[in-house]
Amino acid sequence: MAIKISKLLNGEIISLDSRQIYKGMEIGTAQPTRIEQKIAIHHLVGIRNPSQTIAAGEYAKLVKDKIEAIKLKGKLPIICGGAGLYYRVLKKGIFVGSSMDSSIRKELEQSYDNNPRCLFDRLKKIDPKYSEIVHLNNKKRMVRALEIYKITGKPPSEHFKKQRESINEKISKLYTIFLFWERKTLIKRIAKRTKEMLKNGWIKEVENLINKEANYGNAFPALNSIGYIQIREYLMGKLSYDEMEEIIIIKTRQFARRQSQWFSKEKIDLIIEMDSMLNSESSLIIKQLCKN
């Protein structure tokens, strides 16, 4: 849909996906294909090594720089992706002291791997409010929350409450479109896409990244993602192929649910019922959308 809109409105697409930014992860992060990237210009896709981390504030700055560059060309920036935290930073800015510490993060990640419940209990103690919206299985958000606390001495909820909204830190004019799928349809699409990704070489992709990781000498943060974790376990003989596929589908469904819950709390300008588009002429709807 982003590609079709970009053609109709003379736009360029900026990815808002926390994993599509990495090189060598084309299949598992569903990056736009070479053909799609020829049809429309895409930014922030496959530009960073998987050995590197990226914080929400840094990503937001990259997006804003691309927006200005695209506007200078007289084109329309189209941001496409489902990274809720990055979206919120674009909308509201970033709090003072939003930084990262690789040594603290590594220590917290190790603690999570050893005992996620223990880490979750620590979060509940320092920030009961934030712990209510962070699931025990969401390693990334839990680690980040405790990292913020260790760096600043203040719980995440306090930072978010005082989040600055200066015009220099947020995008003031952002028209947000949410693509809504019925749950039954979404479940079928997730299962179908997972099977296609595995068929198209996802396992080989993970093998290549693991080999690069071994040569690099340190773990790739980007590999701590849905699918990549399960495929690594399959390659280690910890999971059968069917078990691996089933867990990926389940984890993706859980992630999709969390995404929906996240964006239900955001101000959305237009919600498109995608199921109804399956039985109608989508190009006409998109043209009408662009006209509006």
Image: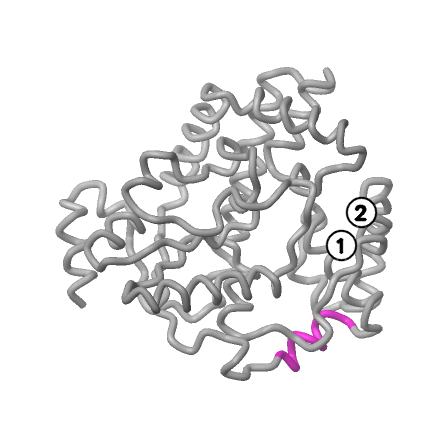
Q: Is residue 58 above or below residue 33?
A: below
Q: Is residue 83 magenta?
A: no
Left/right placement of residue 142 relative to residue 72 reads right
Residue 255 shows up from this direction = no
Q: Which residue has dot 2 on it?
A: 109
Which residue type carries mark 2?
Answer: Glu
Q: Which residue is mark 1?
A: 143
Tell me if residue 38 comes above or below residue 238 in the rendering: below
Residue at image position (22%, 52%) is 7
Q: Earlier in the sequence, mark 2 or mark 1?
A: 2
Residue 89 is left or right of residue 146, and the answer is left
The residue lying at 56 percent from left, 74 percent from top is 93
Residue 260 in percent (x, y) is at: 47, 54
Q: Are marks 2 and 1 in contact (CB under 8 Å)?
A: yes
What is the chief secondary structure element of the magenta stretch?
helix
Quick one: 32 or 28, which is closer to the camera? 32
Q: Which residues are magenta?
A: 155-163
- Residue 162 lies within the magenta run: yes
Observer able to see residue 149: yes
